[in-house]
Image: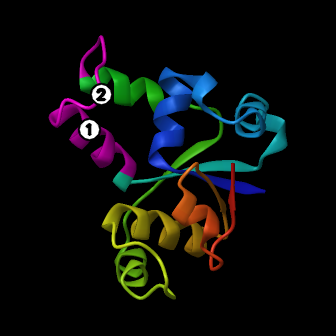
Amino acid sequence: MKYLLDTHTWIWWNMHPKKLSLKVRTLLSTPKRYEELLLSAISPWEFSKLLEKGRLGISCSPEEWLSEALEMSKLRLVPLTPTIAYRSTSLPQPLNGDPADQIIVATAREENATILTKDAEILCYTHARSLW
């Protein structure tokens, strides 16, 4: 099974794993439970925007944090391809208008992956698989 990390899931796993649900924390701590972890290329950008806005603090350089956070077992960074970009704008409704969420959902659909997220709107979205 492939899982795509929502941005907050990726950040929390690397900073505050106890914020994750027990189910997600157990899954991520046991790499043999998944085939591959995916991260949308939009997530490092979202992380950087949180730093820029002062909504997140780290004790090292952003480049160092990103480098270490991308070293998760079986993690693959999924680029924002033209296909994903287009499909993020033509998702079945209803889905919120957050472009990053749309890109994450389109990436999961393109990769046939389940999204690991606490986001209630994504969890209720019937056109993509999600888990918390």
Q: Position of residue 33 (x, y in %)?
A: 83, 41
* Residue 71 shows in the view: no
x 28%, y 13%: residue: 60
Q: Position of residue 4 (x, y in %)?
A: 59, 54
User: Is residue 1 placed above or below 67 in the rendered structure?
Assistant: below
Secondary structure found at label 2: loop
x 73%, y 28%: residue: 29
- On residue 56, the disc is 2
- On residue 2, the disc is none
Q: Position of residue 116 (x, y in %)?
A: 63, 50
User: Is residue 76 placed above or below 16 in the rendered structure?
Assistant: below
Can you identify the residue that label 1 sits on? 50
x 51%, y 25%: residue: 14
The total of numbered circles placed on residues is 2
Lower position in the chain sequence, tag 1 or tag 2 = 1
Q: Is residue 52 left or right of residue 119?
A: left
Secondary structure found at label 1: helix
**Among the 4 quarters of the image, the one containing residue 120:** bottom right
User: Is residue 37 placed above or below 72 in the rendered structure?
Assistant: below
Which residue type does callout 2 highlight? Leu
Badge 1 vs badge 2, beta-carbon distance below 8 Å: yes
Q: Is residue 51 left or right of residue 32?
A: left
Q: Identify the magenta region.
A: 43-61
